[in-house]
Image: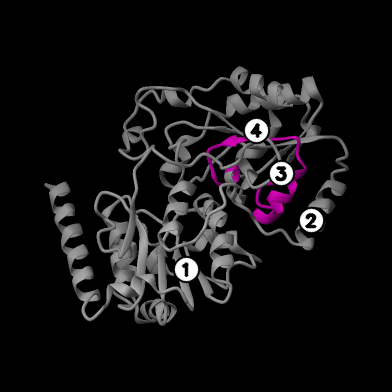
Amino acid sequence: MKIILHRLVIIFFCFLSKSVRHIGRSLTNYRFKNYKKIVILRLGGIGDNVILTSVLKPIRETYPNSEIIIITHSTAACVFKNNYLVDKTFSSPLLDASDFYSLFKSLSFKNFISILNLLSNCDLFLFMYSPENLMGFLKLIFLSFLNFKTILVGMDYNGMGGFLDLKIKYEHFKFHEIEYLKKILILIGINIDENIIPSLTQTINDRLYVENILKKYKICDPFITIHATSSPKGWRKEKRIDSKIFFEVINNLVIKYDFNIFLLGSSEDFTYNENLKKNVSREEKIYNLSGLMSIQQLSVLIDKAKLFIGNDSSLAHIAATTSTKVIVLFSFTDYIGYKPFSKNTYIIRNNLPCSPCIYNRRFLKCTNKKCLNISSNEILNIVEMML
């Protein structure tokens, strides 16, 4: 019954949006090329928005005089820091809301007006985001009503893109996210280079900061960067490989290869990494940098590393923007659509018939989670191959 109700809501609002927005509009508006203001929506985390950076250059090259604005979650706005391809980033509590309670709490005249002002005079609205649930869909519908003249282009998953003027079909486990983003741009006549890759904008200050870190710890020898955690929020913490596995990997790297190891993460990961560090036989070779760097500075550090090893997380996507070889451990998440996009990336996962189960949420009820049973020997064999 709940599924049927959701489908009816989606059909109703898609019909309403298209009906209201198309009053007095000509289909020739779809082919309008002189976009003065382009708004790009990409909700999600840091990793999702690192993926988005891959298509910003062709948009800017095609529309050099357009104002380009990114709408994203507040936690991911840092991805576009110092990025010359973007004029502005925008976040709102209304769009950050993860459930209906927080959505109603964020309803205010101020928040509404800020979004309305942002979308005023917008010629082209690119929905580079496919909602997975009714909450995400209602956010998109809400935005679609705020400017009737805007051309809406994006992804259609399960009918939730029915309100769009131009759309591509979105399917799970079929293509990488970047392939879908490229298809959206092709709809509006943007030529795409097959070799586009995600990127972060590093400044001189970012590089100097990392140099000072290396000098502080007197690091001259090769080092390896490791991200043993994932976001502690919600279901994302469930995709962490057992810390004992990382302990065995780190111990081997220190003893066998004499590598220095940098443990990376946010400030929330500090205690976790400290505990991991204390159990290693040569603790003096392990450095906990949790919460000490911006994502741009992390990309500088990883680029200098011999190797990056980590769980499927935003840091793996950051690592993929560098020239460093990357080993990513996948469990129940979508390794086809969200593999860190780099020719230097190697995926380790258990090929189980029940995995990935990220979209049907079976992992929340799973009692054995065999997909997390990745051994240290598997990882070390790949390390030896990549070094």
Q: What amino acid does circle 3 point to?
A: Ile
Residue at numbered disc 4: 276
Q: Residue at x 40, y 56 (%)?
A: 129
Q: Upstream in the sequence, badge 1 or badge 4?
A: 1
First in residue order: circle 2 vs circle 1: 1
Left or right: 189, with 300 as reference point: left
Q: CA distance from mark 1 to mark 4?
A: 35 Å
Q: Position of residue 382 (x, y in %)?
A: 64, 23
Find the magenta span and give its range: 288-316
Check disc 1 and give the amino acid type.
Answer: Ser
Is 183 drawn above or below residue 109 in the view shown? Answer: above
* Crowd around label 4: few <14 · some 14–19 · many ≥20 (10 Å): many
The label nearer to you, 4 versus 2, is 2
Which kind of residue does numbered mark 4 sit on?
Leu
Q: Position of residue 146 (x, y in %)?
A: 32, 76
Asked whether disc 1 touches disc 3, contact meaning CB atoms under 8 Å apart, the reply is: no
Q: How far apart are labels 1 and 3 at the CA level?
A: 28 Å
Residue at 64% x, 47% y: name it.
Answer: 321
Q: Which residue is mark 2?
A: 207
Say which amino acid is labelled 2. Arg
- Could you tell me which secondary element the residue under label 4 belongs to? helix
**How would you rate the neighbour count of disc 3 (Cα within 10 Å): few for under 14, some for 14-19, many for 20 or more?**
many
Q: Quadrant of residue 95?
A: bottom left
Alpha-carbon distance for marks 2 and 1?
A: 28 Å
Residue with the mark numbered 1: 91
